[in-house]
Amino acid sequence: MARLLALEHAFCALALISASNYAYLAKSTPSAAVKQFRSAIEGSVYDSGQASTETKALMKQHLKKMFDHIAEMATHADLGTRK
């Protein structure tokens, strides 16, 4: 269980870092980038035929929770650094 939680934590942190880098290059905000990432990743769950409909629904539900957390972190990143 600890390994799974560590992987989820790492995914969230990397997703936020990637979104922030993308936002910087696109002259956007981390929150806007997270919305784009969320849409693409949640949508890709249905592109694969490897899981049952029930499993895909559960995966999408879990991804929603994870991206809600990342979106919350992104609102803090939108504020930028303070000196």
Image: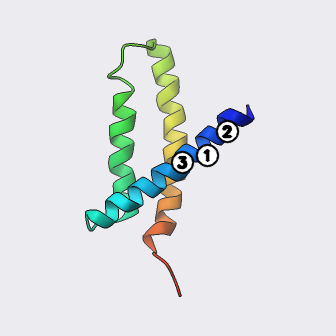
Disc 1 marks which residue? 9
| Mark 1 touches mark 2? (CB < 8 Å) | yes
Residue drawn at the location 28% of the way across and 64% of the way down: 25
Occupied quadrant, residue 51: top left
Q: Look at mark 2 in the image and give the residue it sits on.
A: 5
Q: Quadrant of the N terminus?
A: top right
**What amino acid type is highlighted by mark number 2?**
Leu
User: Residue 7: x percent and y percent?
Assistant: 61, 39
Residue under pointer 3:
12
In this view, the residue in front, 5 or 74, is: 5
Dividing the picture into quadrants, the one containing residue 48 is: top left
Q: Residue furthest bottom?
A: 83
Instruction: Look at label 3 and name its amino acid.
Output: Cys
- In terms of secondary structure, where does tag 1 sit? helix
| Alpha carbon distance from label 1 to label 3 | 5 Å
Using the image, tell me which numbered label, if any, was put on residue 39: none
Residue at 33% over, 66% down: 24
Judge the density around disc 2: few (<14), some (14-19), many (≥20) Cα neighbours within 10 Å: few
